[in-house]
Image: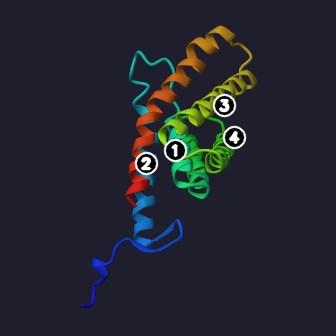
């Protein structure tokens, strides 16, 4: 009995530990990841400004890019980093174009660390994303200190850096599980 194309599974072949997906599965996977990334960018730029108790805007795009690189590999993570930096610039989430470079460097470093030393699971993601959020906090301090001459270090940390770090990390947890669900579904 001959199978039709509809009956064929998305996974075509398994060789060693590597699975090969069909082109339509790749397109669905990355279209879904792209849609989620755009929605996260819109939520980051529009929703968090309306919530009065949140003092700083979390960088959800950073956590999305980081999760894609951590869970799906370096090449998809690098593509997500460039796209995420572009979305951040277009939507006005962060005004510096150097954000694309920062995203790329962070994704490459996290992929190299996670692929060589650790498993890609939630506890490992907690450790590496905490380090990435700390690096993002230093990036924010560097950005503010170079672009602004009148800032108070206490206000900078109390109103921007520490709340941004906490909110980015907390809101990054559901983003991790959303990306994990999408990546593992294909």
Sequence-wise first label, 2 or 4: 4
Residue assigned mark 2: 180
Classify 53 as above or below 99. above
Q: Most extreme residue toward the left, as rendered?
A: 1
Tell which tag, 1 or 4, sits nearer the viewer: 1
Q: Is residue 25 visible?
A: yes
Mark 1 or mark 4: which comes first in sequence? 1
3D distance between C-alphas at marks 2 and 1? 8 Å
Tell me how far mark 2 sits from mark 4, CA to CA.
27 Å
The location of residue 141, given as percent across then percent down, is 69, 23
Judged from the image, the secondary structure of the residue bearing numbered disc 4 is: helix
Q: Which of pointers 3 and 2 indicates the residue nearer the eye? A: 2
Residue 67 circle label: 1
> Which label sits on residue 79?
none
Please, is residue 163 above or below residue 101 in the view? above
Say whether disc 3 or disc 1 marks the residue closer to the N-terminus: 1
Whole-number angstrom distance, CA of label 3 to CA of label 4 = 14 Å
Q: Residues within 10 Å of mark 4 (few under 14, many from 20)?
A: few
Which residue position is annotated with label 3?
135
The answer to whether marks 3 and 1 mark residues whose Cβ atoms lie closer than 8 Å is: no
Image quarter for residue 159?
A: top right
Asked whether disc 2 touches disc 1, contact meaning CB atoms under 8 Å apart, the reply is yes
Drawn side of residue 70 relative to residue 174, left or right: right
């Amino acid at each position: 009995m001959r199978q039709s194309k509809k009956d064929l599974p998305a996974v075509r072949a398994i060789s060693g530990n590597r699975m090969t997906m069909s082109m339509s599965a790749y397109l669905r996977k990355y279209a879904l990841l792209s849609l989620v990334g755009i929605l996260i960018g819109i939520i980051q730029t529009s929703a968090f400004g309306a919530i009065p108790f949140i003092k700083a805007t979390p960088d959800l795009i950073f956590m999305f890019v980081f999760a894609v690189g951590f869970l799906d590999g370096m090449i998809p993570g690098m593509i997500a980093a460039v796209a995420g930096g572009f979305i951040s610039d277009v939507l006005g989430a962060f005004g510096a174009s150097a954000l694309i470079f920062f995203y790329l460097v962070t994704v490459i470093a996290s992929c190299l660390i996670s692929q060589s030393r650790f498993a890609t699971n939630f506890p490992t993601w907690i450790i590496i994303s905490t380090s990435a959020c700390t690096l993002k906090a230093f990036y924010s301090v560097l950005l503010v200190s170079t672009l602004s001459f009148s800032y108070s270090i206490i206000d900078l940390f109390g109103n921007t850096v520490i709340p941004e770090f906490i909110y980015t990390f907390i809101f990054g947890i559901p983003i991790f599980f959303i990306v994990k669900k999408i990546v593992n579904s294909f």
